[in-house]
Amino acid sequence: MSDVTTTGGIAPVTPVPHGRAYWAVADTLNITRRYLTHFRRQPINIAWQLGFPIISVLLYGFVFGEAMKVPGGEGDYKDFLMPGMFVMTMAFGFMNTAMGVVTDASKGVIDRFRSMPMAPSAVSAGRGLSDIVVACAELTILALTAVAIGWRPDNGVLNAIAAFALLLLLRFSLIWVGVWLGLVVPTPEAAGGLYAVAFPLTMISSVFVAPSLMPDWLAPIAAWNPVSSTGTAARELFGNPGAGGSSWVEQNAVLMGVVWPLVVTAVFLPLAVRRFKRLSR
Amino acid sequence: MNSAEHAVRARGLVKRYGDKRALDGFDLTVEHGTVHGLLGPNGAGKTTAVRILATLLRLDGGRAEVGGVDVVRDARAVRGRIGLTGQYAAVDEILTGRQNLEMFGRLFHLGGGQAARRAAELLEQFDLTAAADKGAGQYSGGMRRRLDLAASMILAPSVLFLDEPTTGLDPRSRSEVWESVRSLVASGTSVLLTTQYLEEADRLASRITVIDQGRAIADDTPDGLKATVGSSHLEVVVTEAADLPAVVKAVARVADGEPETVDAERRVQAAVTDRVAALTDVARTLQDEGIAVEDIGLRRPSLDDVFLRLTGDRPAEESAGDETGAAA
């Protein structure tokens, strides 16, 4: 777009000439900036979003801390729980993505973007990038809180970094679940009902309790839950107790912590793209 | 840049949803620098037509050009020269008015400095400077629509699509939006306006297309459309219902057809051709007969009459469709 657009009376403005790839990146960053500006405009939202995990850590850590036993019998429940809290926060993130997308869709903001000469991919990519930035902030605050109440990663810096990378990979895969859901559900109010899905998704996992302690029919479901794989992998990499398990999926948690998010992305990224394209049907 | 003959030219547009044809061979021509009204009952295809022209929907048949550019083959170029204001104020309610316009400006690829300058200019033009740094969520309905309009005007588009821009606004906000639209057209923008409010089309549009069941069923100036419905009406309202038969007799002598009586309002009306002669004749007769007249006058046909005549008086709910606006 190098033409000068002029209409009498209104000062001319000139779109800056650049290639498509440049604008795909610049548009994405501009959408990301938009969502991050939301936090600056409404600091209370930061308090909510970051406060919830902190409260959860303190709540579960101290309320359950003494009553619960680490599977295998050794170690402090708090050390077992912290990686679980990290993964739960990542897992719940898809709700934020879905909420943001459905709000834009129902208010016509997505239509406005689609009627503009910007890169269509930037709408979702920008949302996703801002979600990852927020996830990094959440993990930082969670880890600091966890350290403050006595949690320690005991397996070296590199393994700890690998654990955080797996947590972010899970969050990345759930961006596409969130975008897809955001385009499928009709209204933000309806999207609120998704918590009914989010809770079992995170609770039927190794977040709070080892699957081996669950009823026989529930244990395999919990063990094969992608959230469990990331949780168990994080425990292993942080050197926290209770990482093990007898099933194949639990013994290959780090591998599955990579495979699951890739599978989820492979399924939901195309679904989200297809849904976005269907807007023009 | 705009060498095209028409601002918008659509021929034989078809859009199917399953078995239903939302558009069924729809034609439209919008001249440069005019406001063109698109009227029709709910579900007639107004929004579908606008969304196709604004590159938001793929069409199943026909051909459409905006500023001479094909909306299918070169959607991106079309997007560089149109503005769209839909049925909702599509702005970010958490961001301030200024942040909204700057964000949209950067997404229109203006670059940071130019986007900021343009935002300040538009805030001034749309009388939003005082509220520029407040969250758009705190704006009144009218202010939000003006912000929405301002966002559509960032590139000074050659064609602006306004899809029911004043639905749900109070009368004052509505006239503010009308004022903005008029000044845009004065600066050379062409506008395609869909509306539920016939008065709005009458005030703003220099030409009107009536759409029903996916087809253009009339295309004329507002006056031309009114002329097709017929001549003026003579209306008489009397004080005593008992006088109605006498009034009907008096009116029938000058009317084009059978006078119509509305008992509840004690009103008699009929189409008349020789307007002033008919009025004086009836007035004199009623005076001679000593009938107490509450009101007597001539009424030109309104667009409502045109609309009802052309589309029938089917209730709006009957025609299911893509449109979500309130009933007319």
Image (cartoon, rainbow, N blue to C red):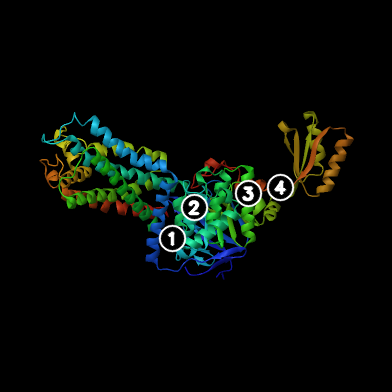
Depth order, front residue of A1/A39: A39
- Label 4 marks a residue whose chain is B
> Do tags 2 and 4 sit on the same chain?
yes
Q: Quadrant of residue B237?
A: top right
**N-terminal-most mark, 2 or 4:** 2
Cα–Cα gap, marks 2 and 4: 43 Å
Q: In the rendered structure, which amino acid carries the disc numbered 2?
A: Asn
- Mark 4 neighbour density, 10 Å: few (under 14) some (14–19) many (20 or more): some
Q: Relative to the observer, which residue lies in front, A85 or B189?
A: A85
Residue kind at label 4, given as amino acid type: Pro
Res B31 visible: no
Q: Distance between the residues labelled 2 and 1?
A: 16 Å
Figure check: B79 above or below A94? below
Mark 2: secondary structure: helix
Front position among marks 4 and 1: 1
Which residue position holds label 2?
A: B100
A183 versus A207 height, above or below: below
Q: Is residue B188 left or right of residue B269?
A: left
Task: Answer above or below: position of A54 versus B217.
Answer: above
Label 3 crowd (10 A; few <14 / some 14-19 / many >=20) = some
Name which quarter of the figure residue A9 lies in.
bottom right
Q: Which residue lies under the disc numbered 4?
A: B301
Going by the numbered disc 3, the residue's amino acid type is: Glu
Q: Which mark is nearer the camera, 3 or 4?
A: 3
Amino acid under disc 1: Met
Tell me what residue is drawn at x 15 percent, y 47 percent. Answer: A155
- Which residue position is annotated with label 1? A118
In front of the other: B203 or B81: B81
Specify the quadrant of the image occupied by residue B243: top right
Image coordinates for residue B28, horizontal then vertical, percent: 57, 59
